[in-house]
Image (cartoon, helix red, strand yellow):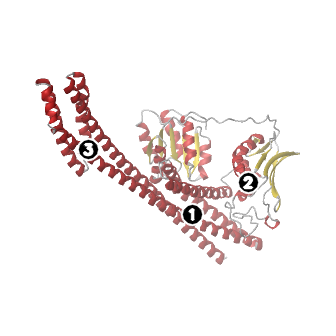
Amino acid sequence: MRAGYASLTGFGRKNAASVIASALLLAVVLWMAQLSLHEMRDTSDLSDHSEDVRLALAAVSQSLLKMETGQRGYLLTGQDAYLEPYQAGVAGLDGQLQDLERLIADNDQQSGRLRTLLQLVAQRRAQLNHGLDLRQTVGIDAAIADIQRGAGIVTMREVFDDLETMSAQEAQLLAGRKQQEQASLQRNFHLIVALSTAAVLLLLMMLLRVQREMTARAQAVRQLDETNATLAEATASKTRFLSAASHDLRQPLHSLALLNAALGGQQLSAPVRAIVAAQKDSLDAMSMLINRLLNISMIESGVIQPHVEIVPLGVLLASLETEFLPQARAKQLQLQILPTQEGVRTDPALLREIIQNLLANAIRYTDRGQISLRARREGDAVVLECSDTGRGIPEDQLDRIFEEFHQVRQGNGEAREGFGLGLSIVSRLTKLLDIPIGVSSKPGAGSSFTLKLVAAVYSLQPARTVVPIVPSLSRMGRILLVDDEAAVRDATALFLQMDGHEVRAAASPEEALRVIQQWEQSPDVIVSDFQLNATLNGAELIEELRELWQLEIPAVVLSGDTMKVSPRCASMSACRVFHKPVDAEELSAHIRRILDGVPA
């Protein structure tokens, strides 16, 4: 027993080290991504500044040309109408020179050129005015003779030479800043991908240790009945560990996912876009793994409790067909889900989770043919059968397919697919709902899973197809954001701002109450973390803010710990819970549906 305890202790220390190292790497990636965004924004501002200087130089040039054109026309005709371009150029020139002086005040070299330019412009204006005076007082011959002396041409050439030199200097600065921006993005994104890969590898090492430990425990249970109590305690300890580890990893992973989405919305080069897409794939894989681990821990800890009601299978199966049809078509498989009017008594959300895992497994392990899902009545029961024409399961592995991390292998050379947790979740949920599950399979001919559900006395009409309402995506809203962790709060605020919304952020419920009172109108949406490390949690804060405004403000609760948040928020209307790490596109679409008045 002491040797076993020592082994478990070593197991816990190694995994704790892996989790801490992964969290630190993700925090570094988050920090670097923030620096990259700020640097990109600063460089973009400098580039815009250079463009403004060039536009100001062009405006000065245009005004001088208008003055030249107007003076020549008046000298030749003597008509006041030809002075309009001259007067327009004079009217705009002083303001344009002031704007130019303001724009290049931080550039000593350009400021020196501007002083010379101002002297030349003043000299040329005096020459133009002198020509007009000669035309008005002496006559056209005197004015033309003054022009023919060539002093004005020389001055104007010097003016345009100065303008061209200054514009070329700004163009050179602009090109250098663009190169700096590109180099910075390439460098930072390569570092981010490298660190993200290292974090994934550390997490996979932890999972391999988990797999080896679970295998050893299963063997010990079969061999020694007297160790059951010790193994049960170890499993409960591991569940608590996985839950805590998932929560700790969710926070930086959530921030990184939002920053990744914000970066993906920028104007980036093709290589950088490829890096961002690869980073998103890694984040999605890590998010799916953490969610699977947390689901197992929640089921085993008893947090998930079934809510039995009458479930119309036709509606449920129709929605599953919509969900999985694109995946089946992507592998050129037929997905056959037969309509039914049967009803059953069970928890609809948990039943959906079971069927989703079965369909996902069937598609994953079927290379050709079809997947079918059908319901049939057998006395007081409804049998739901999910069949495929896939690779099948060897007979010696049928008893192990519901174990954590176990994956059916037909040969040593096969690549690993998924994480081996889907059927483990199915097994736990069917036990929780008291649903008998059966499986039959033949290698190379496919597999069939059956669920025996309690039938309900239910009369159904054929399911109607619901056409989703597509929001206009035109409204931008006022969003109050509350999160006590600065890095997560900044990342969330940056993503929402880049999505076009006005965001005001608060670090505590007290600060949120002060911020909301400064608005003349109520916010359109409240986005709050659930665990605020304060006297109020996110749900309680939302209720207090609604009472303050006497208005049911739509709300979004973000949480990295689903152990308490779901039951607490289930009774709140106009409130949806997103578990971290949040899918950025889903969060953005949900907020826009709220703003467009579309039911969520």
Answer with left or right where residue 24 lies relative to residue 463.
Answer: left
Give the amino acid at mark 3: Leu
Q: Earlier in the sequence, mark 3 or mark 2?
A: 3
- The answer to whether mark 2 and mark 1 are in CB contact below 8 A is no
Give whichever of 235, 560 is nearer the camera.
Answer: 560
Query: Can you identify the residue that label 2 sits on?
Result: 363
Q: Nearer the viewer, mark 2 or mark 1?
A: 2
Q: Could you say which disc has been placed on residue 163 in the image? A: 3
Tell me, for residue 94, which label it has, or none: none
CA gap, disc 3 to disc 2? 67 Å
Which quadrant holds residue 162?
A: top left
- For marks 2 and 1, give the CA distance: 25 Å
Q: Secondary structure at mark 1?
A: helix
Farthest bottom residue in view: 3
Residue contact at pointers 1 and 3, CB within 8 angstroms: no
Lower sequence index among marks 2 and 1? 1
Q: Quadrant of residue 344?
A: top right
For badge 1, the amino acid type reads Val
SS class, disc 3: helix
In the rendering, at what x and y percent does residue 268 appear?
47, 51
